[in-house]
Amino acid sequence: MITFTISLIALVLGYLLYGRFVERIISPDDRVTPAVSKNDGVDFIVLPNWKVFMIQFLNIAGTGPIFGAIMGAKFGPAAYLWIVFGCIFAGAVHDYLSGMLSIRNDGVGLPELVGKYLGNTAKTIMLVFSVLLLVLVGSVFVYSPAEILKGLWGDFGMWIIIIFVYYVFATMLPVDKIIGKIYPLFAFSLLFMALALLVCLYIKMPQLPELWDGIGNMGAEHFGMTDNIFPCLFITVACGAISGFHATQSPLMARCVKSEKMGRPVFYGAMITEGVVALIWAAVSSWFFFGGGAETVGLNLSASAPRIVVAVSMSWLGIMGGILAVIGVVAAPITSGDT
């Protein structure tokens, strides 16, 4: 728990110190933002700061900070290092710059930004690349929540259809009609899940692997994995440390921010918050894989990430707490998929 605690503190300090350093480079001012100058009541609309943060947090969360962290925990304490340094110096900087560049370019999306700063050839490549990757990401963000929901109630195919129908309505209607109303509730569920598990960690104080136990691949010994840890760890814990698709999400909230000075709390802060969620699930999963947690919740070590989420949430938080936690975990990929 010592390594986990230090990592948690490091993420907070990263926001306060390095986040401020990055902000000074951009130097946000009082210029009129696209939410005001291009307000159309559909995509460009001023939303309350807290709501913009909540939506941005859910837009970028996806499955990475939960499922990715669960799988990444098999590598051992090295996962903590990647989450902390990845969030502070890569993921949060990337999200902040993407959002601020969009604000200062009339709220345009990633391809337009690439075209302006890198040329039309790069823009064309980025368009093709983005479409391909977003189709893959969208597929995961449909499959993952449907996998969890079918385990609770209903048929897998039924949930796939329901999620797609929701996508159509959420993306066609103005941003404040569905997204602006229900995302804060989903965000509350996700944050409740993270904070509740954090409290449980400090109450239970489980024995977790520490950095001084070694930063090599612990999965090589326990799960028959190879000794290699890089680059596999980078692509396993994706959204919880850095993810390129975040650059396609940040402009959505760049069109809803009233002041440039909200950029750091919204864009940098949401990524750090996501890192905290990833860190908590990495710690919980370390207990599951290395501290006897699998036996405690009645699963084997080869259980899928969705099953681990449901089992641990119900075991630690009870039925009502577990339901809220599962709602948050299901909402994260769905709310990333539609946007």
Image: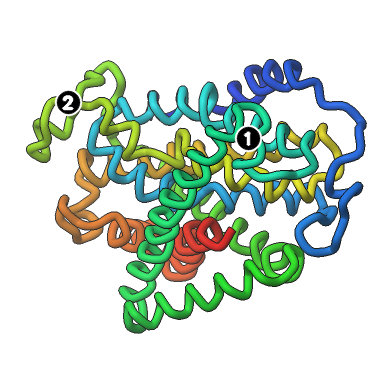
Q: CA distance from mark 1 to mark 2?
A: 37 Å
Query: How far from the left and from the top, in percent, is residue 148?
Result: 35, 67
Mark 2 element type: loop
With respect to residue 23, does 91 lie above or below? below
Which quarter of the picture shows residue 248?
A: top right
Q: Which residue is mark 2?
A: 228
Which quarter of the picture shows residue 25?
A: top right
Work out which quarter of the rendered image holds the C terminus and state it.
bottom right
Mark 1 crowdedness (10 Å alpha carbons): few <14, some 14-19, many ≥20: some
Q: Which residue is mark 1?
A: 115
Q: Mark 1 or mark 2, which has the lower sequence index?
A: 1
User: Residue sitting at 42 percent across and 49 percent down?
Assistant: 133
User: Is disc 1 in contact with disc 2, using a CB cutoff of under 8 Å?
Assistant: no
Amino acid type, callout 1: Gly
How many dots with numbers?
2
Query: How far from the left and from the top, in percent, is residue 304?
Result: 24, 57
User: Residue sitting at 75 percent across and 21 percent down?
Assistant: 26
Query: How far from the left and from the top, in percent, is residue 331?
Result: 51, 62
User: Residue sitting at 16 percent across and 50 percent down?
Assistant: 301
Mark 1 element type: helix
With respect to residue 326, does 246 lie above or below? above
Viewer-side residue, 42 vs 83: 42
Mark 2 crowdedness (10 Å alpha carbons): few <14, some 14-19, many ≥20: few
User: In the picture provided, is 300 more to the left or to the right than 186?
Assistant: left
